[in-house]
Image (cartoon, coloured by chain):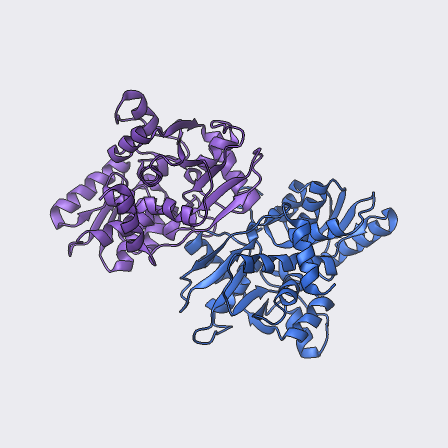
Chain colours: A purple, B blue
Amino acid sequence: MGWQDEIEAAAARIRGHVVRTPVLEFDGFGLDRPVALKLEQMQHTGSFKARGAFNTLLSLDVPEAGIVAASGGNHGAAAAYAASRLGHPAKIFVPEMAGASKIALIERAGADLTVVSGAYADALEAALEHEARTGAMQIHAYDAQPTVAGQGTCFREWEEQGLEADTVLIAVGGGGLIGGALAWFAGRRKVVAVEPRTSCALNAALEAGGPVDVEVSGIAANALGARRIGSICYDLAVEYGAVPVLVEDDAIAAAQLALWQQLRQLVEPAGAAALSALMSGAYVPEPGEKVAVLVCGANPAPDPLGV
Amino acid sequence: MGWQDEIEAAAARIRGHVVRTPVLEFDGFGLDRPVALKLEQMQHTGSFKARGAFNTLLSLDVPEAGIVAASGGNHGAAAAYAASRLGHPAKIFVPEMAGASKIALIERAGADLTVVSGAYADALEAALEHEARTGAMQIHAYDAQPTVAGQGTCFREWEEQGLEADTVLIAVGGGGLIGGALAWFAGRRKVVAVEPRTSCALNAALEAGGPVDVEVSGIAANALGARRIGSICYDLAVEYGAVPVLVEDDAIAAAQLALWQQLRQLVEPAGAAALSALMSGAYVPEPGEKVAVLVCGANPAPDPLGV
């Protein structure tokens, strides 16, 4: 099947399991034009990742040992939630650096959770060891076909809700979400790939002519800090000409504050990164160009009502 | 004009000045059925009150001295915002008990602000003195025809967005919002009036056969704590048979937590009160009854990103 068919199939599969997240048009943020927003951070477990997780679990045979994932937070929570709703055991390895609020989120989602000292790479190593020992199915956070197709349903849904934009701005971590957008839009709309200067795996890959390792840091690192862009995303970005844009951490923080103060949407830094490209002028649309921003994640630390 | 015409006129007047707030259907909160939600807390200054404020300023002659209001927070912010956008001076008197985050909100909205020691009654006295001295126009928070018609546009808009519910649950303070709902629906849908047991001016009025003073306290008091229900609301509640329901503070807090944990909507207690009636069983819908909840306000204290 081609991507369009894969995404149609994913949408049919995950219907009823995911939130049809709301959209609106908003005239504010100091911009010279209204912006269309989709509030995908209202998805189960607070990010788009529930789409890919449900599509993966519903399209593959899950072994009795269930699933295993390593995650800086959002992916682990989504995988645990989907597994729990579908009756599969979930084992999640999370690095300490994910922070208390994302760790609590994964626990609430119903996972058997192990906090690994160190960084994401250490959690991944533990997850691979668990997979080898138990036969549990490893759920990749972004570079897998069912994951990308699942995330692509977000954009199919947005068009069903009347998306009119010429250009859609999307934050990039490992590339699962923007991969889904590129696959779904297939060149019909311009896709702007927004990365923090401190975590810019796609920009680096496009410069180098292929995925390369990058250093990651900054305020959005635990959500956008993939060390290497997924190859599925990279290929789609080249095929459809994704427009790479870099934003500074302080621009992300300003967009995060604007989303709260102007729209009462409290998001994590990654969830504000795409908007920050417009607010800071990192991406300047043409006169008349209609723009849209996907708000992708809302698991801030500290949690305003908990840990 | 009748209410329907007043609300149509208000909608035409305030178009472009207010946010067309998003709606969604959500299956969660431990309920036995999906619930339709309108996220009116995404309105300018974080509550529905911007609708009534804009309708008031756009339908009356505003004197050179501008407007004056006394407010526990949300009304003052909305009045200040609307005045500032329309180029009128705004003088807002706010009691200390409004708290730092609502006081900062009113300042951001562009008002000349005076914090009055004591409670709402003291702020109101100062506002009346200012009105008498300067000729500024007093903007009432709820018991005025342009205010109620403005709030009514929220429900007109919701129907335009496809509202299908048999029953709409709405939190009640002074009665401006639910008055607008009753006026717009005019008996076509059941309206459930949700009040905290600790701030129940409408329940008390319906029992007494007319508006009476009540004591107010509890976690939603600075938004829902009107001492006496507005007479416009009371008359509409009797005419159309609003169904009064009382909720406890801990049920409100549980609904506030659920809105954050399940939908990443961080609201103030008043904004969660209507949902709490369903979650706590204070209102039990019939089998097959379709329910909707208006989320009305999101100015929590402390502010998660500021004071």
Q: Residue at x 26, y 27 (%)?
A: A211
Q: Is residue A172 above or below residue A60?
A: above
Q: With B172 as the anchor, is B2 left or right in this view?
A: right
Task: Name which quarter of the figure residue B192 lies in.
Answer: bottom right
Q: Nearer the viewer, residue A215 or A36?
A: A36
Q: Residue at x 51, y 68 (%)?
A: B277
Percent across and percent down for residue B154 are 60, 57
Q: Nearer the viewer, residue B65 or B301?
A: B65
**In the rendered picture of this protein, how many numbered marks are placed on residues?**
0
Percent across and percent down for residue A80 are 28, 52
Q: Is residue A135 above or below residue B251?
A: above
| Residue B116 in sight in this render | no
Percent across and percent down for residue A127 are 20, 43
Q: Nearer the viewer, residue A135 or A24?
A: A24
Task: Name which quarter of the figure residue B274 lies in.
Answer: bottom right
Task: Name which quarter of the figure residue B242 lies in.
Answer: bottom right
Screen quadrant of the C terminus of chain B: top right
Screen quadrant of the N terminus of chain B: bottom right
